[in-house]
Amino acid sequence: MQALPKGRVIAMVFAGRKDLMRMLMRNLVRELYAHTITHVHLWDFIADRQSPDAIYLRELAARYPCVTVKQGNYKEIPCKNHNRKGRSCPTARNWAEAYSAYVNESQLADKDVLIKLDDDLPYIRNLAALIKATRLANGFVYPNIINNDVGAHWQMHDGMIIPSALELDIPSIQMVWKGRHNKDFKDSELPALGAKRLCSEEVCARYRGYQPYSTLSRHSEPMDGWFKEYKAAMMVHRAFIANPYRFYSNVTHVWNHSQRVSINFVAGRGAVVRQVYRELSASKFFPLDDEPLMSFHWPRHFHFTHSMVMSCLVVHLHFGPQEGDYKGVLEDLSRMLDAEGAPAVPDCDKCVAPVAENKAAADQAAAEKKAVAEKKAVAKKKAHKDPVAAKPAPACPPPSPPLPPPLSPPDAMWGIAVRK
C-alpha cells in the first residue's frame, strides 16, 4: 500500500451564525479529538464585533486550543466590478483577504490539506476518507454533500435518490434527474442544431451553466436552479435522515470537464490550493465572486480534475434563496450526532451580557422593560383582587319598632277591658 505523506489538515471556516456554528463545531471537535484535522481557522467577517455571533467565536477559540479566530475585513468599499461600479457594498466581505493567508509555502506546505467550509454544515461523517483522497488528487475534492446540485447529480446517478412523481414536477429536480447518467454534465445533454452536429459555443454557453473557456463569464450560473428551490433541499434532507446508510458508497467520481460547483465544502492539497488562492487574492474585483473562479475558471486553467468522494457525507443545510423552516432537520441531525457520541459544544456564556459600548442603551432598554413590567403588574393586581377581602360588608337591618306594653293575664285571656 502506498504510504501517504503527513502534513497539517486545516479547516478554514467562513464564520459564523452562532446557532449554526454550534452544530458545525460538534463535528469539527470530534475530528480534532480523532486527529483527523489539526487546526480550525474561524474567519470572522461579522460586521458587529460585539454581536453574540462574534463573541461566540472568541469563546470557541478560548475553549479549544487548536481553534483560532482570524479577523476579516468588513467595510463599505466602492464596488469595482462591472455590475456595481461606483456603488457602495455595505454588506460585502473582502473574501480575498482570507484567501491571501494561504498563498505562500510557509503558510501552506505541499503536504498540507486545506478544507474550505461554510458555517451551515450541521453534519460531517467519515472525513478521513476525503482527506486521503485529497492528498492523492490533482485538483479539488468534494464530499458526498447533501443539498448540492452536483452532489444531487451523482446521488441520482448512483441510485441514492429516486424522486417521486410529485417531486419530478419541480423543474430543478427534473433537470438533474434527466441528466443523471451524464458523466461530464454536458455531452449527452447538449441541444443539437440539426441532425449531426452539436450546438455552437454561444448556445452551449447558455445551456445548464456550461461555459467554454474561451467565452467564460465570471457570472456564469450554477448547473441548474437547485440553489433556489426549498423543496429540492427538503427532498434530499428527508431522504438522508430516513436512511443515511443509503448514501454511503466507496465510489469516487472524477471528471475532467470543469463544472461550476457550489463551494460549501471543498478540499485541496497545499500545492493545488496555493495556485488558485494566489489568483483569488490578487483579484481586483470587489465583491469577489469566488465560487465560479474557484470551482470553474482557475481549475480549468490549471488543468485540474474534480473529485467527489461518496464515502464522506456532509449535510449542507440550505442556500440563501432556499428560504424555509429547517428546525426539524436540525433537530433530527442533532439526535444523530448524539447517537454517534459526538461531543457537546457549550453554548455562548457571554453573548447575553451587555458590552461596554452599548451599556447605556442596554441599561435604558432594561429600565423601560422593568417599568412596563411593573405597570402591567399593578394593572393585573387591580383586576385580580382577593374576592373575600373585596366583598363589601352587609348593611345593618333597620331597628324594629317598639313593642306595645303587655296586657294583664285576665284581660288578655278574655279579651275585654276592665274599667277601674
Image (cartoon, helix red, strand yellow):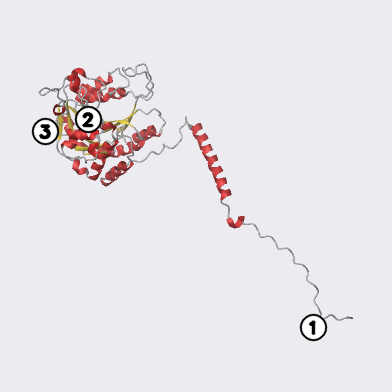
**Would you name the residue on which mark 1 appears?**
414
Q: Is residue 245 above or below residue 132?
A: below
| Amino acid of disc 2 | Ala
Quarter of the picture holding the C terminus? bottom right
Residue depicted at x 28% and y 20%: 281
Residue found at x 24% / y 45%: 242
Q: Residues within 10 Å of mark 1 (few under 14, many from 20)?
A: few
Question: How far is the residue under mark 2 from the one under mark 1?
Answer: 128 Å
| First in residue order: circle 3 vs circle 2 | 3
Q: Residue furthest right?
A: 420
- Camera-near label (1 vs 3) is 1
Left or right, 91 with respect to 312, comes to right
| Image point (45%, 36%), residue name | 353
Q: Give amino acid for label 3.
A: Gln
Looking at the rendered structure, the kind of residue marked 1 is: Trp
Q: Residue 152 vs residue 330: left or right?
A: left
Alpha-carbon span between mark 1 and mark 3: 141 Å
For numbered disc 3, what is the local secondary structure? loop
Residue holding disc 3? 2
Q: Secondary structure at mark 2?
A: strand
Q: Quadrant of residue 171?
A: top left
Which of 312 and 148 lies nearest the eye of the viewer? Answer: 148
Q: Are marks 2 and 1 in contact (CB under 8 Å)?
A: no
For the residues carrying marks 3 and 2, which lies nearer the camera in this image? 2
Which residue is denoted by mark 2 in the rendering?
Answer: 267
